[in-house]
Image (cartoon, helix red, strand yellow):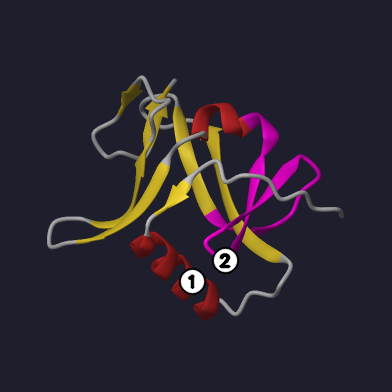
Amino acid sequence: MESTIVKKPVHLTEGAVNQLKRIYSEQNLGGEHGLRIGVKGGGCSGFSYVLGFDVQKDKDDVYEIDGMKVFMEKAHSIYLLGMEIDWVDGLNNRGFTFKNPNATDACGCGTSFSA
């Protein structure tokens, strides 16, 4: 499958990159795997974020972001362009956070949104 690498559509903070690389290493994934960033229908606000490791699919654009191969379906970029993904490791909150300039509304947990 041919890959096209273009300008990155999302920003990964240093904390997110470190955590993602740790997870990738712990899962012993092969070179065909990359980080999938996307959306799916559902959640309390209409869409939920997809973040996980996967192999490239036919509908994907391929990006290189901070040394990681990233897959994103072409149709999802309208919802994700300009988004920042961060890793929070605090006393009351631990996990990935999504700051999405395209979201018109978000739920209290921060994992679903509407556009």
Which residue is the site of mark 2? 67
Which residue is rendered at x = 74% and y = 67% of the image? 32
Which residue is rendered at x = 49% and y = 44% of the image? 10
Q: Is residue 85 magenta?
A: no
In the rendered view, would you say 9 is above or below 12?
Answer: above
Which residue is the site of mark 1? 21
Q: Which residues are magenta?
A: 52-75
x and y, in percent, of residue 37 in the image: 55, 47
Task: Write down the quadrant of residue 18 in the picture.
Answer: bottom left
x and y, in percent, of residue 91 in the image: 12, 62
Q: Are marks 2 and 1 in contact (CB under 8 Å)?
A: yes
Q: Is residue 64 magenta?
A: yes
Q: Nearer the viewer, mark 2 or mark 1?
A: 2
Residue occupying the far right of the picture: 1
In the rendered view, would you say 93 is above or below 27?
Answer: above
Residue 76: assigned label: none
x and y, in percent, of residue 33 in the image: 68, 65
Dominant secondary structure, magenta: strand
Which amino acid does the dot numbered 2 rest on? Gly
Q: CA distance from mark 2 to mark 1?
A: 10 Å
Q: Secondary structure at mark 2?
A: loop
Task: Write down the quadrant of residue 87 in the picture.
Answer: bottom left
